Image (spheres, helix red, strand yellow):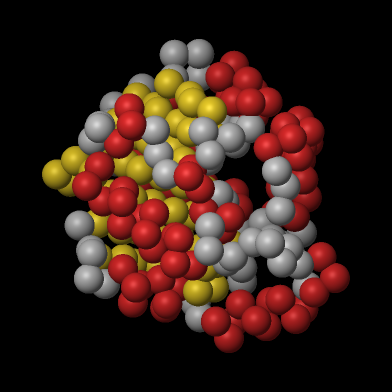
Amino acid sequence: MLDQKGFNLWANEYDKTVQVSEENNVYPFAGYKKSLNMIFNEVMKNPQSTVLDIGFGTGVLTGKLYEHGHSIDGIDFSSEMIRLAQMKMPEANLMEWDFSKGLPKSVKEKQYDWIISTYALHHLTDQDKVDFIQGLLPMLSKTGKIIIGDIAFDNREQLEHCKKENLAHWDHDEFYFAADEIREALNSYGQCEYQAVSHCGGIFVITT
């Protein structure tokens, strides 16, 4: 797994790397563009809403939401990606922060209509994912939703099959979603729905 320095060095080529994988419909970013479009369309149902983006990268998704009048808070641990994203969103509140250590106090004290995260939470272990998502639920407004787009599979069997097919370039330091396990783990905290977008990607919608 890349550290902060690694992501800083990758920042300028990140979008191009994603595009190649997405266009060729291969692990790990097959379905990436479709996932972002689906999240964009969902958030756009609530005009000028408050959005927290966790691991926003270069601001591909939140940059578009910002252009359409949404209020953006974001956290990312790459200063270089923040620099690139801030150019797209000069008035957005973008913070350098490692979400694996929790969330900044200033963010935790707010409420959001949407908390979104795309291709970031796979850096957390499965149990840490559940704990992290549980901690986000009190930060939602009355009708708020959490939407996560990431490398994900319907179940552990599909995950292992993809791993076998892509073993030569599989990232063993990342922890991908098995949707049935995540849904069960979050069942007592809220409602969790999952929609597959590709053979290695999908979207979770979580509400209280």
Quarter occupied by residue 111: top left
Residue 53 is left or right of residue 169, and the answer is left
Q: Is residue 37 above or below residue 163?
A: above
Residue 112 is left or right of residue 17, and the answer is left
Could you tell me residue 15's position as x and y percent? Answer: 71, 39
Quarter occupied by residue 21: bottom right
- State the residue lying farthest toward the bottom: 157
- Please name whichever residue, 32 or 152, is drawn nearer the observer in this view of the structure: 152
Residue 190 is left or right of residue 151, and the answer is left
Could you tell me residue 126's position as x and y percent? Answer: 49, 67
Instruction: Tell me what residue is drawn at x 53 percent, y 63 percent.
Output: 125
- State the residue lying farthest toward the left: 142
Instruction: Tell me what residue is drawn at x 74 percent, y 35 percent.
Output: 5
Could you tell me residue 17's position as x and y percent? Answer: 77, 45
Instruction: Tell me what residue is drawn at x 76 percent, y 67 percent.
Output: 170
Could you tell me residue 195's position as x and y percent? Answer: 43, 67
Instruction: Tell me what residue is drawn at x 78 percent, y 73 percent.
Output: 166
Q: Is residue 115 above or below residue 50?
A: below
Residue 111 is left or right of residue 52, and the answer is left
Q: Is residue 140 visible?
A: yes
